[in-house]
Image (cartoon, rainbow, N blue to C red):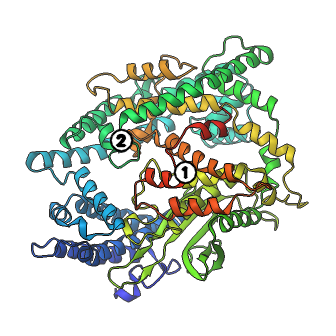
Amino acid sequence: MHGMSNPLLDFTDLPLFDRIRPEHVAPAIDTLLAEADRALGEVTAPDYPAQWEAIARVLDVATERLGRAWGAVNHLNAVADTPELRAAYNEALPRVTEFWTRLGADERLYAKYKAIDPAGLNAEQRQAHRNAVRNFVLSGAELTGDARERFAAIQERQAELSQKFSENALDATDAFAYYASADELDGVPEDVVHAAHAAAQAEGKDGHKLTLKLPSYLPVMQFGRHRPLRETLYRAYVTRASDQAEGDLKRFDNSALIREILALRKEEAQLLGYPNFGEVSLVPKMAESPAEVVGFLRDLARRARPFAKKDVADLRTFAAEHLDLDDPQPWDWPFIGERLKEARYAFSEQEVKQYFTAPKVLAGLFKIVETLFGVVIRRDSAPVWHPAVEFYRIERGAQLVGQFYLDQPARPGKRGGAWMDDVRARWLRPDTGALQTPVAHLVCNFASGVGGKPPLLTHDDVTTLFHEFGHGLHHMLTQVNEHDVSGISGVEWDAVELPSQFMENFCWEWDVLRHMTAHVDTGEPLPRALYDKMIAAKNYQAGLGTLRQIEFALFDMLLHTEHDPAQDFLPLLDAVRAEVAVLQPPPFSRTAHTFSHIFAGGYAAGYYSYKWAEVLSADAYAAFEETAQPDGTPDPETGRRYREAILEAGGSRPAIESFKAFRGRAPSLDALLRHQGMA
């Protein structure tokens, strides 16, 4: 196939999403991998100069093209999945992965980077250079002989174990079913009962098929009045993939896998010269040490505890007075919680939705961004993968700053959830000397409009849109010219959620909501009384919720630092619960056995990142609360400082420096506690 006719090999401007076909994938990836390999060979030759620009001009240009083409394939696989595309994607995936892994541990390339004199680099290049050297070390590039081989074997075995852990968690969840009678489903929402009945019928069985998947499990736990049914499901849920599962379901037990994963992580850390995996995990993160993280979590737990205790006291009183439950059991709490919430804040999501029409919300979001960050957002055009996709440009003055695709509606062949992804990064290109502007994907899964009316968003949808747009702004408003540290690139894992969570705060402001709501039929803005209920419900059980997250995070960090992998880890989990939790689970509970975030998902010794970034974003937002104008609108001067210190700086300096540049001090817990009603 001739190069020019393959749209994946056309890098003149934006990806040709309307022309890319599954048969283009293999030949394009073949070509780009060969070019990247050739480039790697060239820059690692003994006589090639150890200079940043010289390496970038050859190697970075080739790997950036590979990254952009693979990014387009990866994106289409997520938003326009077909059997043919999936096959092409799966065929190419191992080859692409193998190349990046090999590049990351190439000792010849590592030697070149080490030989570069940092004195000849600008500040952005110095940060990118530091990151590159650090990543080589963490990928085992300094190891030789047996240690090097063992390190590679550990990586391979860990990938297998993580995959098996995931499969067990999934299969254990899928393998359980309970067929309930109509009486047992008293109180369960009608749509859930219907779905359960249909599922049983499809198998030719009587009754209603209940499973441990959340759309089936949660509503029964929250609304089902039949206690024995709740107990049955709860017991099955908290023993998934463990030694405590019923009978035949024990075959999915993850205990041995967890032990082996922990032992391999400790061995990997020691090969790299660290005492434990917690230390390794934090090398590229914002937090300085495991001790700092543990101290942070314990401090937050101490402050949240009185509120969690009050939450439980309220639940106990309500259960005794209104539900005839004098001694609530673990399977009763979600039910009691839901009933108390109804009694206190009776409002329906359906009612709220009528005020959030997609076009009005989007216009409101754009207006905030334009006002705060001194930019203009306009419609633009580009080849797209579906007619529903919109394309926009962001300008400052007459300058193009960045562009983004917005894909809002859910549809078949599109992965669930919402995400931001980069199409390309801002880069002063070493090959042409031209400035490449950043482009982003913003993907959601909202319901489509019905009967000629605009789509209606839940308040959750609105928050999600603002969240992803926050990531997008971080990527698009950057002023950094060095590819590897521009936008979201090179930003620490525990700080990358700061700009996204920051934007969510606006969705809870009365002065903002007033202007971005209009009832789909009457055009009336959201009523104040409904808003007040939403705010009250937002912080419902914030104390309990915070302690639950801290329990997971503290267990994760201690498991990867103080714990000896040769010992059973259950006593550690019990100790953490004794210290943190105000509601103790029963002895048969085995939640660690499905803790996929840390055993199969990249959050090992990093689960604390969620809370850490929440503290940063709440504290950053507090600067806007402190400087708000008399009418409640945010102050553009504070917006300019936030834009320059945090968004424009991207990954070009440590996140703590960016935070201090904006706030004038280190982050504090106070704003988060206040925002969650725990001040």
Per the image, the residue denoted by label 2 is 164
C-alpha gap between disc 2 and disc 1: 44 Å
Q: Is residue 466 left or right of residue 274?
A: right
Mark 2 in CB contact with mark 1 (< 8 angstroms): no
Residue drawn at the location 63% of the way across and 47% of the way down: 622
| Residue 417 shows in this picture | no
Residue drawn at the location 74% of the way across and 50% of the way down: 509
Q: Quadrant of the C terminus?
A: top right
Residue 11 against residue 250 in the figure, above or below? below
| Residue 288 shows in this picture | yes
Q: Quadrant of the N terminus?
A: bottom left
Per the image, the residue denoted by label 1 is 663
What's the amino acid at mark 1?
Arg
Please provide percent x and percent y for residue 554. Answer: 44, 30
Front residue of 396 and 627: 627
Q: Residue furthest right?
A: 522
Q: Is residue 54 left or right of residue 506?
A: left
Q: Secondary structure at mark 2?
A: helix
Front residue of 627 and 211: 627
Please provide percent x and percent y for residue 89. Answer: 40, 65
Neighbor class of circle 2 (other Cα within 10 Å; few <14, some 14-19, many 20+) is some
What's the amino acid at mark 2?
Lys
Please provide percent x and percent y for residue 288. Answer: 37, 42
